[in-house]
Image: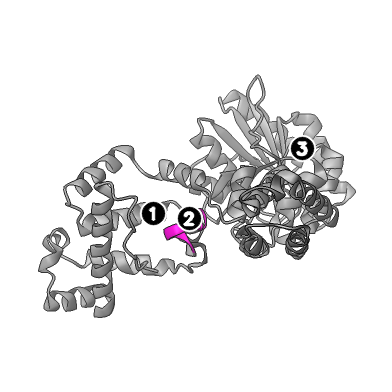
């Protein structure tokens, strides 16, 4: 997420971080690098100018220059300013006092509105809501069918009707939503390749009819400042209540993410972080700021783990580790749990880049390797998975043939498994303060 911006900002601040004494020259040089990093990331020029000026003003304060750790103090100032720029704190969804609440999804064509509608429906259901989706995009071929396909995939209903007039479809869907006990209506609206009066007039008619609790702009971060410019126009005509930034997992420069709140005054509420329908995160400015500066995002990682890991199973696994009874079956199950959390590169990027985790954000993950590991373990007999020490040379050859992988990969897997057992045994005995064994990751 925002890898390019993150690496450039960290590089710009790396030299000043370790300085025992910081002068105005040091600050000027660092701020010049910060300015270039932000401009290259396509952040709005005025936003960059104000951002750098605020940091410089605070960094030149006597409390910083005379501090025992001035470099660290400046990093803190940069982080605080990033949080301020991104919106200071998370802003939740607003719901109507009397259900159903209406959430309109608006944006340009190709921004990811329909997929984001499905993701938000999934998120709402997980948080105790009963959403109904409706497509009012009667212009784009197969737009209504696309939402219907998403509906079947996530098992959340989408309104169906022969009506091919946007406002009338929305009205019918609202009535069905209210009559059938749904408490949220998600309206996937039409987009255009550019903003025009016809599009905006239709959206205004939908807004006036439905009186939505939320009007969320779905903005593609890959489009950079174009996303900010379109957000300004949508906000002027519709009075947006929030923004959902899509495609944050792509090779985005990050300008939209950092500029959109400052330019439009509209808070970012969600981030689309992948192709799967579960890949939607509530936007936390402090967490994204920490991630950009290489400080990790452990809270989001914990939240992901809580949704994917069963507490009772985790307790049973802890007991196995304490008894030194961690088998290859358990190793396979843990890999499956990790894969449920999302793409591994994203997970590694959430770890603070210090100590044993330093450099993990640069690790390139080949997800196929995890599938290969599972195939190798599945090719073992139950006895071999329970007692790895009996796996001799002939057994390794048989396992390799059964999984379609070379013997060298079987050997590497067993080595990784033994290292994992060793690390877990140490951690269960309270060895967190000691140096962890070097792990060779299976990707």
Q: Is residue 252 left or right of residue 168?
A: left
Residue toward you, 297 or 366: 297
Residue contact at pointers 3 and 2, CB within 8 angstroms: no
Q: Is residue 388 left or right of residue 21?
A: left
The residue singled out by tag 3 in the image is 167
Q: Secondary structure under badge 1?
A: helix
Vertically, is 443 above or below 332?
below
Residue contact at pointers 1 and 2, CB within 8 angstroms: yes
Q: Main secondary structure of the magenta part?
A: loop
Image disc number at residue 351: none
Q: CA distance from mark 3 to mark 2?
A: 42 Å
Q: What x and y, as percent, mark residue 231? A: 80, 48
Asked if the magenta segment contains residue 357, the reply would be yes
Magenta segment range? 349-358
Vertically, is 83 above or below 181?
below
Q: Which label lies toward us, 3 or 2?
A: 2
Residue contact at pointers 1 and 3, CB within 8 angstroms: no
The residue singled out by tag 2 in the image is 347
């Amino acid at each position: 997420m925002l890898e390019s911006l993150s690496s450039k900002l960290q590089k710009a601040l790396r030299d000043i971080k370790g300085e025992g004494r910081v002068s105005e020259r040091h600050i000027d040089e660092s701020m010049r690098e910060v300015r270039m990093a932000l401009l290259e990331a396509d952040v709005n020029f005025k936003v960059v100018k104000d951002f750098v000026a605020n940091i410089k003003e605070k960094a030149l304060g006597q409390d910083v220059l005379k501090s025992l750790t001035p470099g660290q103090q400046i990093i803190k100032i940069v982080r605080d300013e990033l949080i301020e720029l991104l919106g200071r704190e998370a802003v939740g969804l607003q719901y109507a006092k009397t259900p159903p609440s209406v959430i309109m999804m608006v944006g340009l064509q190709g921004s990811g509105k329909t997929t984001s509608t499905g993701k938000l429906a999934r998120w709402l259901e997980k948080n105790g809501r009963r959403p109904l989706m409706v497509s009012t995009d009667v212009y784009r071929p197969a737009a209504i069918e696309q939402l219907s396909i998403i509906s079947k995939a996530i098992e959340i209903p989408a309104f169906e009707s022969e009506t091919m007039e946007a406002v009338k479809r929305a009205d019918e869907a609202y009535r069905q939503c209210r009559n059938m006990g749904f408490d949220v209506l998600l309206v996937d609206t039409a987009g255009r390749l550019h903003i025009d009066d016809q599009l905006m007039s239709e959206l205004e008619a939908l807004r006036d009819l439905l009186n939505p609790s939320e009007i969320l702009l779905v903005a593609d971060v890959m489009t950079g400042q174009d996303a900010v410019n379109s957000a300004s126009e949508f906000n002027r005509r519709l009075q947006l209540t929030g923004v959902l930034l899509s495609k944050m997992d792509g090779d985005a420069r990050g300008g939209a993410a950092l500029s959109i709140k400052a330019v439009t005054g509209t808070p970012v509420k969600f981030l689309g972080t992948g192709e799967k329908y579960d890949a939607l995160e509530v936007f936390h400015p402090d967490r994204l700021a920490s991630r950009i500066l290489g400080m990790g995002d452990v809270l989001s990682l914990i939240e992901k783990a809580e949704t994917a890991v069963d507490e009772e199973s985790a307790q049973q696994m802890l007991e196995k580790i304490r008894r030194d009874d961690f088998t290859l079956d358990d190793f396979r199950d843990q890999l499956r749990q990790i894969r449920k959390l999302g793409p591994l590169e994203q997970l590694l990027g959430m770890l603070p880049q210090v100590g044993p985790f330093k450099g993990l954000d640069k690790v390139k993950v080949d997800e196929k390797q995890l599938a290969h590991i599972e195939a190798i373990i599945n090719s073992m007999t139950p006895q071999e998975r329970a007692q790895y020490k009996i796996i001799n040379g002939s057994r390794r050859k048989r396992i390799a043939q059964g999984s379609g992988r070379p013997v060298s990969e079987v050997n590497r897997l067993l080595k990784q498994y033994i290292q994992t057992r060793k690390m877990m045994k140490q951690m269960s005995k309270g060895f967190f303060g000691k140096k962890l064994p070097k792990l060779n990751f299976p990707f």
